[in-house]
Image (cartoon, grey):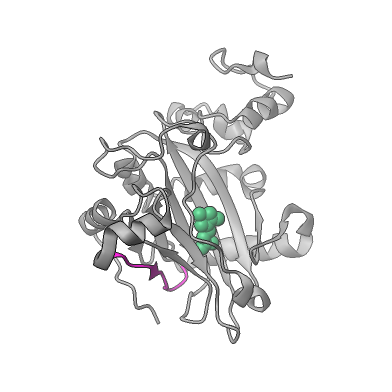
Amino acid sequence: MSTNAVQTTKEEILEHYKENGFAVIPNALSQEELDYLNGLVEKSLQESPDQWHKPIEGAVGTGSFLAQYPLEMDKFIRHPNIFPLIQEVLRGEARFAQFDFRDVSAERASTSEMNFHRDISYYGTIGGKIFDPENPYISTYTCVIYYLSDVHECCPAFCLVPNSHMYGTLAEAKEKQGEAYREIPIRGKAGTAVLYNITTYHTRKGGSAACTHGRRTMHNYHSRATSYPLTNWATVPEVLALSDNPDTQLFYSQWTPNQLKYAKENYTKPIPAYYPIHMVK
Ligand SMILES: O=C(O)CCC(=O)C(=O)O
Ligand SMILES: [Fe+2]
């Protein structure tokens, strides 16, 4: 079913990421974890459809689980199998940025194609750095997409162009990379994780008209202490952002403009003075 190469040891994963801007990690989640997450997704789709945005390029999605199950989701956001790798590629500066689930139904599989793009931070769009030449892993942000369903040949598939972070356009990547230019669709079993530098050109390939599976994913973006917040909207529940555990509080400390407002309006504990909540109306 899966034709793409995978990386399994820590050394292989980091080496492949360094060379190509991504790595594919099979069995990152156990069957028990997959059953738990799929159970939550199914329950939410059925009981709280209002928490899911309307299909965007074929995928419905929700960022609501972090607020609903903060301690449980934190265990996936800083998953013991993957978080050490995230810390490595972000030079030990990993900060929470965004966490959401997406679901492409079998009916929408063939119309779920995206365009090739890079995920550029809000500040990147106004001149902030989008990659770091001094980081051996290049990344200013990294994302891990977990497949929660098997991704067969017929299914929508995450797809990227290795080592393409430095080009201004996909056309430029094609021209400058020449024979080395590759578009690699990633297929694999549920539980596969794709770790990628978000400024590597990537897309979602649509599934075939005959696809009867669709695709379900968990998307987890991480920033660095030296990067700006990735979005201007993501919010974090108080139990994590003002956790008594200093590591947890630090990890959830990169507050977006919307988070400042959210904290001011909802948190019960005093908010540390270094957060500029006085700026919030
Ligand atoms: O769903 C996918 O495979 C890719 C999603 C993506 O690139 C994005 O949402 O920016
Ligand atoms: Fe993207």
Residue 254 percent across, percent down from the top left: 51, 29
Residue 17: quadrant of the picture:
bottom left
Residue 186 percent across, percent down from the top left: 41, 69
What residue appears at the point 65 percent right and 20 percent down from the top-left corner? 269
Please give left or right for residue 223 compared with residue 3 in the image. right
| Residue 276 belongs to magenta span | no
Q: Is residue 167 above or below residue 40?
A: above
Residue 33 visible at all: no
Residue 43: quadrant of the picture:
bottom right
Nearer to me, 9 or 30: 9
Residue 4 percent across, percent down from the top left: 33, 73
Please give left or right for residue 229 compared with residue 26 in the image. right
Nearer to me, 174 or 265: 174
Q: Main secondary structure of the magenta part?
A: loop
- Which portion, as a residue range, is magenta? 181-190
Q: Quadrant of the N terminus?
A: bottom left
Count all numbered tags in the image, as a single digit. Answer: 0
Q: Is residue 237 above or below residue 111?
A: above
Q: Is residue 78 above or below residue 268?
A: below
